[in-house]
Image (tube, rainbow, N blue to C red):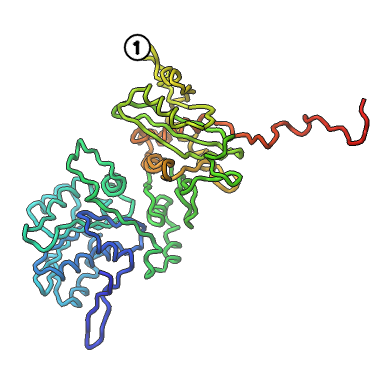
């Protein structure tokens, strides 16, 4: 669908719905499960409702469902517009059953699911279309059980689909990102999960020219920071986010802590500058926790770029060390900061650290303190050098980049009992980063720049003057 939906009223043609490009893309998707994720003000609820309208108008006796978490949310969104829309579409809306009826026999029902017990109301139903509005407010159990009602007869001229719209805030944000964005679902728990069945489309305020973006942004800036960043920038943050100071980009779209391309020095990509000094950081794990290694370069002005990552599961220490050494070929690595437990033998003949050293990867143990982790990383995130942050992380770029570090950064939460501490969780990449930040790695030294202070340099004899 690419054109507008119109109707003729009293001889005058009236536009009911004129989708913008990002909405056209949503309607055109054939994915079994589709999520429209983005900032506030992109028309996600409108897109969802008209997606249902279109399907109901195209297929006679089609059954569609749109669901929100609470009834007040439903009343202030879809129910505020559906009555007028159905009159223009030649149908009716029954306020007692919250059901829209179309001239061709199709129906669109609006429901809410506030508690886990409410899920039982959907188990015996069957719909060709189920739309979750603000998906992040639902639990995974609610989503899976209600989605099971998306079914179609074998001879149906359509495929039953699940559609959703959401911003990053909500109790279900973590599972929503896991299923639709990161696609890192635990196959042991969900063996039938198929990543290709889950599509995500992202949109921002700029994608909705119908909205006065300047006025809307001004209103959002008065909200708490975590709400503003989620609604205005589409970032994955909430009030318990530990690294609230981690910004992928600035509010005007300028790259900040995350960069798209390999930085250059004196006109050359960093990996082509042979005198730069590199560092590594390792958080050890075997199973189920992974071993993680990050690679850094520290520029002469003390700015650090994390440009590469790798992780291993159920892999012995000698193999991990050999891979790290191989992946560091051509780099002048000065030091490898590590988890202090790597130097504990625990009844073995050799510690993990000693195995690393035997394989050409000497390590320097850092302190294992979840309060210090935060302090060290906060210092790097909040320090500006020459107008740029002290720490920047490269997005996936060919064989380089740190996708897992970038992905897990916003997932870090405060310890509920000790807010200054980093809570346990999927933190292996961030902990490795903390070891590097705690190491206070010295900057690279250009061979073209003398490190001897001017007052210590020997004076040259004047020309044409004899010396004794």
Image coordinates for residue 203, horizontal then vertical, percent: 35, 59
**Picture quadrant of residue 165:** bottom left
* Residue positioned 69% across, 32% down in the render: 451
Q: Is residue 43 left or right of residue 8?
A: right
The quarter of the rendered structure image containing the N terminus is bottom left
Please determine whether, in this image, residue 109 is positioned above or below residue 199: below
Image coordinates for residue 34, horizontal then vertical, percent: 24, 55
Q: Is residue 404 left or right of residue 386?
A: left
* Residue positioned 33% across, 51% down in the render: 169
Q: Which residue is mark 1?
A: 347
Q: Is residue 461 left or right of residue 223?
A: right
Can residue 246 be seen here? The reply is yes
**Picture quadrant of residue 129:** bottom left
* Residue positioned 47% across, 31% down in the render: 328
* Residue positioned 48% across, 46% down in the render: 257
Q: Is residue 467 left or right of residue 301?
A: right
Of 207 and 413, the residue lying toward us? 207
Please determine whether, in this image, residue 382 is positioned above or below residue 424: below
**Picture quadrant of residue 310:** top left
Of 178 and 311, the residue lying toward us? 311
Image coordinates for residue 402, horizontal then vertical, percent: 42, 41
Image coordinates for residue 316, horizontal then vertical, percent: 34, 23
């Amino acid at each position: 669908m690419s054109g507008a939906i119109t109707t003729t009223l009293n001889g005058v043609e009236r536009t009911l719905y004129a989708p913008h490009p990002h909405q056209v893309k949503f309607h055109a998707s054939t994915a079994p499960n589709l999520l429209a994720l983005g900032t506030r003000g992109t028309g996600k609820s409108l897109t969802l409702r008209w997606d249902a309208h279109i399907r109901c108008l195209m297929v006679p006796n089609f059954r569609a469902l749109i669901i929100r978490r609470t009834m007040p949310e439903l009343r202030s969104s879809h129910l505020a517009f559906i009555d007028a829309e159905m009159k223009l579409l030649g149908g009716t809306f029954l306020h007692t059953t919250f059901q829209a009826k179309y001239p061709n026999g199709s129906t669109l029902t609006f429901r809410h699911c506030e508690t886990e017990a409410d899920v039982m109301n959907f188990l015996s139903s069957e719909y060709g279309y189920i739309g979750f509005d603000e998906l992040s407010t639902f639990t995974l159990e609610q989503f899976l059980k209600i989605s099971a009602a998306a079914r179609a007869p074998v001879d149906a001229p359509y495929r039953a689909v699940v559609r959703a719209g959401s911003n990053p805030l909500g109790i279900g944000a973590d599972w929503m990102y896991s299923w639709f964005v990161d696609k890192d679902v635990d196959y042991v728990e969900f063996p039938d999960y198929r990543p290709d069945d889950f599509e995500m489309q992202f949109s921002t305020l700029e994608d909705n020219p119908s909205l006065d973006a300047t006025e809307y942004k001004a209103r959002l800036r008065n909200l708490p920071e975590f709400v503003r960043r989620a609604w205005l920038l589409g970032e994955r943050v909430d009030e318990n986010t530990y690294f609230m100071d981690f910004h992928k980009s600035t509010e005007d779209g300028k790259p900040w802590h995350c960069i798209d391309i390999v930085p250059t020095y004196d006109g050359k990509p960093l990996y082509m500058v042979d005198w730069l000094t590199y560092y590594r950081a390792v958080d050890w794990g075997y199973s189920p926790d992974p071993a993680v290694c990050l690679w850094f370069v520290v520029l002469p002005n003390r700015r650090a770029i994390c440009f590469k990552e790798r992780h291993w599961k159920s892999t012995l220490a000698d193999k991990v060390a050999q891979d790290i050494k191989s992946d560091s070929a051509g780099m002048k690595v000065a030091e490898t900061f590590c988890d202090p437990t790597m130097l504990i033998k625990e009844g073995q003949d050799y510690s993990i650290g000693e195995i690393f050293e035997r394989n050409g990867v000497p390590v320097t143990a850092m302190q294992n303190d979840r309060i210090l982790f935060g302090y060290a990383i906060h210092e790097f995130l909040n320090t500006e050098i020459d107008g740029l942050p002290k720490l920047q992380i490269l997005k996936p770029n060919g064989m380089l980049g740190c996708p897992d570090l970038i992905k897990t950064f916003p997932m870090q939460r405060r310890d509920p009992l000790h807010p200054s501490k980093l809570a346990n969780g999927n933190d292996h990449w961030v902990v490795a980063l903390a070891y590097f930040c705690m190491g206070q790695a010295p900057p690279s030294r250009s061979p073209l720049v003398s490190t001897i202070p001017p007052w210590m340099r020997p004076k040259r004899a004047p020309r044409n003057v004899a010396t004794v």
